[in-house]
Image (spheres, rainbow, N blue to C red):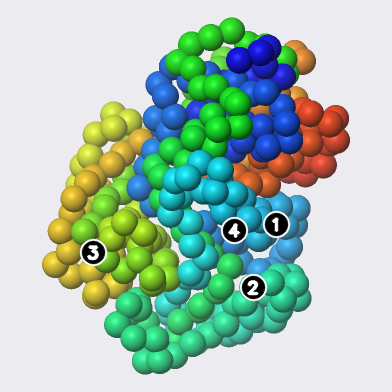
């Protein structure tokens, strides 16, 4: 490969999406990660791409909405160039309505979605009895159905991104020399590096545990109930997750907290009863102090850039994060929301 125009440290979802967005604009890219692609939280199981509620609109919600709308074309192109499945499908999401207050709130959000989602997606109320067996329990008999939520298979998606980058002339290395513009997308390790230079924490690791069930519901929507995501995948599995642990002894140890999540999932979604658990996973997710992605000029590496803080929404934000960072690094066009800049986490 000739000298790289852009070097990205970190081959998680942000690093790979930025690399792909730069490569598809004709830049030569080099991705360096000693652990290989998707080795951290991007190699997990869940893959829920879901919006914030359609109310109290702000730059973060607008950015996420744009990214979710971009996702179909983004992942279709990755699949076409790579020749690999990503597991992406925009099949929507179901959520139970707990009581009359929640029902009134859901109705008001229906009006918000009609305005804020620009007719590109719906948020509506449905009777549970009209939707069949693949539904969560609901004390009111009502469910929220939104058509903006999508799913993908995290491992398939990362593998496809790697293949698309390589097919476009990019390279992925375990070690190597930085050339051109440099972007750090190193997740938890990157946050810890910044913490060492700041009087208070810039960000932290949050542990998540999830599980994979053998159950083919590949054409069904995802479900969010009892604070648990239930996500059917294209390969005939269903992902269940996840915990959100600020304190932990081991980043990869599976414990009883995951058993509690699984039990809650079965209580909320009876159709899961009896499904075989075929994998359990634990890992660390990078959470910035601002709780938003961190994009822009690197706060401690002069002249370099950062794309970090995906936390629970990294895959959903990835298409727009990739585009915004490519705009900044390749074209000098800065349209990053103030809430996403490193200063927001100081």
- 5 w.r.t. 47: above or below: above
Picture quarter with the N terminus: top right
Q: Nearer the viewer, residue 338 or 296?
A: 296
Q: Whole-percent x and y of residue 241?
A: 35, 53
Pointer 2: what residue? 121
Q: Whole-percent x and y of residue 188?
A: 49, 28
User: Dot 1: what SS?
Assistant: helix
How far apart, in angstroms, are the residues tagged by discs 2 and 3? 28 Å
How far apart, in angstroms, are the residues tagged by discs 1 and 2? 12 Å
Sequence-first disc among 1 and 3:
1
User: Dot 2: what SS?
Assistant: loop
How far apart, in angstroms, are the residues tagged by discs 4 and 2? 13 Å
Which residue shows up at 43% across the image and 54% down it?
Answer: 87
- 31 w.r.t. 208: above or below: above
Pointer 3: what residue? 215
The numbered disc on residue 66 is: 1
Which residue shows up at 61% across the image and 84% down it?
Answer: 107
């Amino acid at each position: 490969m000739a000298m790289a125009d852009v070097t990205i440290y970190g081959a998680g979802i942000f690093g790979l999406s930025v690399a792909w967005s730069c490569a598809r604009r004709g830049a030569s890219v080099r991705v360096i990660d000693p652990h290989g692609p998707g080795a951290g939280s991007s190699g997990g199981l869940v893959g829920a791409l879901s919006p914030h509620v359609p109310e109290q609109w702000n730059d973060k919600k607008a950015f996420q909405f744009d990214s979710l709308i971009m996702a179909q074309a983004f992942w279709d192109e990755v699949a076409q160039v790579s020749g690999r499945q990503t597991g992406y499908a925009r099949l929507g999401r179901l959520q139970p309505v707990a009581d009359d207050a929640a029902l009134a709130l859901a109705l008001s959000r229906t009006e918000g979605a009609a305005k804020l989602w620009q007719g590109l997606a719906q948020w509506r109320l449905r009777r549970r009895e009209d939707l069949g067996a693949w539904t969560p329990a609901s004390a009111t008999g009502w469910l929220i159905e939104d058509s903006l939520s999508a799913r993908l298979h995290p491992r398939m998606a990362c593998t496809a991104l790697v293949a698309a980058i390589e097919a476009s002339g990019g390279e992925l290395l375990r070690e190597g020399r930085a050339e051109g513009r440099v972007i750090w997308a190193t997740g938890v390790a990157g946050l810890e590096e910044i913490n060492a230079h700041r009087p208070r924490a810039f960000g932290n690791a949050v542990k998540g545990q999830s599980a994979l069930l053998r159950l083919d519901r590949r054409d069904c929507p995802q479900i969010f109930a009892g604070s648990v995501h239930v996500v059917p995948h294209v390969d005939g599995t269903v992902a269940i997750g996840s915990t959100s642990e600020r304190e932990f002894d081991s980043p990869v140890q599976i414990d009883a907290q995951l058993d509690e999540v699984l039990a809650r999932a079965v209580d909320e979604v009876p159709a899961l009863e009896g499904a075989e658990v075929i994998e359990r996973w634990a890992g660390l997710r990078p959470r910035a102090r601002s709780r938003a992605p961190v994009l822009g000029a690197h706060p401690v590496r002069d002249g370099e850039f950062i794309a970090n803080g995906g936390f629970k929404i990294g895959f959903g934000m990835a298409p727009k994060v990739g585009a915004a960072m490519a705009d900044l690094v390749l074209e000098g066009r800065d349209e990053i929301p103030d809430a996403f800049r490193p200063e927001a986490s100081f």
